[in-house]
Structures are given as structure tokens and as C-alpha cells.
Amino acid sequence: MALPVTGSSSTDERQADIDLVVVGAGAGGMVAALVAALEGLRVVLCEGSQQVGGTTATSAGTLWIPGNRHGAEAGHADSVQAAASYLDALIGPDDGRQLRQAFLESGDAAIAYLEERTDVAFVSAGQHPDYLALPGAAIAGRALAPRPFDGRLLRGAFARIRPPMPEFLLLGGMMVGKADIQALVRRWQSWPAFVASAGLVARYLVDRIRYPRGTRLVMGNALVARLFYSLQRAGVDVRFGWRLRELTVEGGKVRGATFAVDGQERRLDSRAGVVLATGGVGHGEALRAELAPAGMSLPSLACDAVNGEGITAARSAGAGFERYAAGDFFWQPVSRVPRPGGPGLFPHLFLDRAKPGLVAVDAQGRRFADEAGSYHTSWRRWCATCSAPAAMRPGWSAMRPSCTSTDWA
């Protein structure tokens, strides 16, 4: 499917009537651009690649919002105070800026704002335990999942939604959520499960007549599509192929940014400044060399377009750079899998790794970690224990596991 052409034709928009420039069309950047537009600002959203979604498009799209209304409506008991206790136990007290407290107090209101004024919609994810059993931890109620979205509403712009990982698709292009999996597994055991499964497959087969993949979107793909659809309805100017080069600083203030577009340099000025939402370190070689543990060459599960240009531009403009004692990245267990065009990385979250009967052992055959622990904490233990990428060879998989992969924040 051909991608529609978008973007301004002028080479320099220093005098243009732009209030805000947002860089990066992942979930964070799209939310920033959408809210600014709803509040009356003229916004330009610049994306370096040709598709929206970033790493969110390949994720579960789950939001951690303590005390949210959807969890309460589903009967799950939770409170912001309990979540604050959990975070205190997990990472220590809030800092002087009280950003954590601001997040806890405004999270539910932010969700309500989006649901009331846009096409973004969530549902309680039900049982979705916090990663560690610490004071204030919750079993259910804090996690929100995006509601499924009909990609056909985007018409020709559906191709702008970055697809999920191919290993997460059935029949070569059909997305399924948690509830769908239950129906598919039990399709021959009950009539309702069979009807639900038949409906999913029939919808997918009809989709493939017109689209390269199924248009019934779930998880992170649904969140990305809902945000992009809302941006279209709000009339936000989205420009693809605009890769950030540097911020424009005049008089000690950020006045705009310059971009590389089709081999040319383009500049945008904005009254309110620039929002950087380009993701984290990702595939940025220089930043990875600076921040990665010594001696480790770490592939990344981040979107291919994420290479740290936002961080680099901000630091060049004089921004501070905070580092945390626990590290600047999230560990993720992966296997290298064959894909068209070259090997890819498949993340082992919990659907396979935590199944009953799976035991992880090191090169000496000793069990060294709780297989059912969170991917981050269990793999930190893995990396501390294993001296070789092939240290774990579980019989349940023909794939080659690796303990040297990170999902950079």
C-alpha cells in the first residue's frame, strides 16, 4: 500500500504561524501534539521515519495508572497512596521536584481527558500484578489496556501505522489479544469459543483482500492507531521523513529546530518551543557506547528509527542529563530469529518464559533465577550469572536465547 505524501513544501518556516513543534510520533509525541492542538495551539508533529508508533506499536500498549476509574469500575481496589508506597519501596522517595507525585495525582484525570475529547479508549487490564512483591504492590486494577481499533477507519493512512513484530501475528498478519487467545485455544471445546474464533479468522480473510495485514488492531498497535486517527480528526500537521538535526537556541531559549528532509536542511520556528519525544538511546551507537555496561555489545528491541537524536540535540543545547543508580535501560530476554531481510529479535516476556515446567539453568546446569519473575529483574540476574549468550538452552525452544539484549527506555 502506497504511503500518502504529507508535509510542507517550503524549505524554511521561520516566520510561519507555528505555536509548538513536537518531534517524534510515538505514543508520547502524538499525545503531546494532540493535547496541544485541542487546547488551541497550531502544532507541527515531525516524524523521522515514514510511520507512526515507534516502539509502542510493537508493545502491549499497557499503561500503569494507579487509582484509575476503569479499574475501580471493574471492582479492583487500589489507591494512589498505595502506589506511592510501592514506588517509595521500589526506587526510594520522590525528589524535590515531586514529578512522581504529579504523575500519581494526574494520571486518571489525563486518561479521562483523552477519552472524553479524542478517540483514545482504554479498559482495565484485570489481573496484571506489579513486578515486585513490595509494600503497596497491587495484583490488579492499575494496568490499562487499549481498546481494539478498526484500522479501516484510517483508509489509505492505515499504512502509516507501524506493524507489530511478525512473530506476534497469526496467519501471517492477524493480531490477537489476551481474550482472543482464550477463544482460539478453546475453539473446539465450546460453541461460543468456536463462533468467536471463526469471526476473527473471517474478518482477517476479508481484510487481506484489501490490506497487507489485518485491520483489527489490539494492544500497542491499537493505541497508536487511535492516537493517529485522533490527530487526523483534529487537523494536526504531521510530517514524515523529518529527522531532527539540532535545536535552534537564541537568547538562551529554544526557538525551534532544524531537520534533515530529503537531503536538505529545513528549519521550523515555534512560539512555545519544542517537545522532544524521540524515544531513548535505541540504536544510537555513540550513546550506547557511553551508557552501556563496559564490554557489552547490546542489540536493541527499540524501533529501528530510534537512535537517540532527541537526547543528543537536548544535550547539545545545554540540557542536563540524569542517570540513575539502577541503570539507564531495561533488560529483556530475547532470541535471535530468522526474518526476511535478516535476523530479528523475539522478546520472551512471560507467555513462554513463565510456563509451568520451564527451568532456566546456567552452563553448569544450575538453576539461577525465578523464571516467572519480571523480564527486567530476572534478566539482570541472568546477566549477572551467565558468562556466555548461550548459557541457557531450554528444551522447549529451538531458538538461540541471548542474555545481551536491552530494551532501551
Image (tube, rainbow, N blue to C red):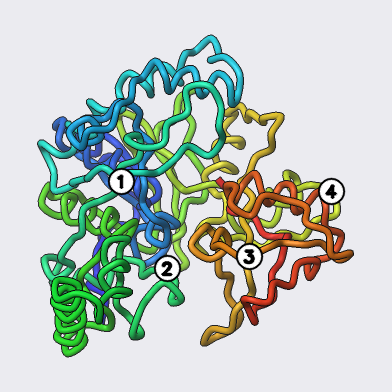
Q: Which residue is mark 2?
A: 262
**Left or right for 361, reference 43:** right
Q: Which mark is residue 358?
A: 3
What secondary structure is found at the residue carrying circle 2? loop
Closer to us: 164 or 261: 164
Of labels 3 and 1, the one closer to you: 3
Name the residue type under label 4.
Ala
Name the residue type under label 2.
Asp
* Cα gap from disc 4 to disc 2, whole angstroms: 37 Å
* Cα gap from disc 3 to disc 1, whole angstroms: 26 Å
Q: Residues within 10 Å of mark 3 (few under 14, many from 20)?
A: some
> Could you tell me which residue is drawn at 45 percent across and 18 percent down?
84
Name the residue type under label 1.
Ala
In percent of width and height, residue 376 lies at: 61, 47
* Cα gap from disc 4 to disc 3, whole angstroms: 31 Å
Q: Which mark is residue 125?
A: 1
What secondary structure is found at the residue carrying circle 3? loop
In percent of width and height, residue 268 lies at: 35, 45
Closer to us: 136 or 241: 136
**Left or right for 259, reference 119:** right
Q: Which residue is mark 4?
A: 294
Name the residue type under label 3.
Leu
Point out the image quarter for the C terminus: top right
Q: Residues within 10 Å of mark 4 (few under 14, many from 20)?
A: few
Of labels 1 and 4, the one closer to you: 1
**Left or right for 392, reference 265:** right
Closer to us: 390 or 246: 390
What secondary structure is found at the residue carrying circle 4? loop
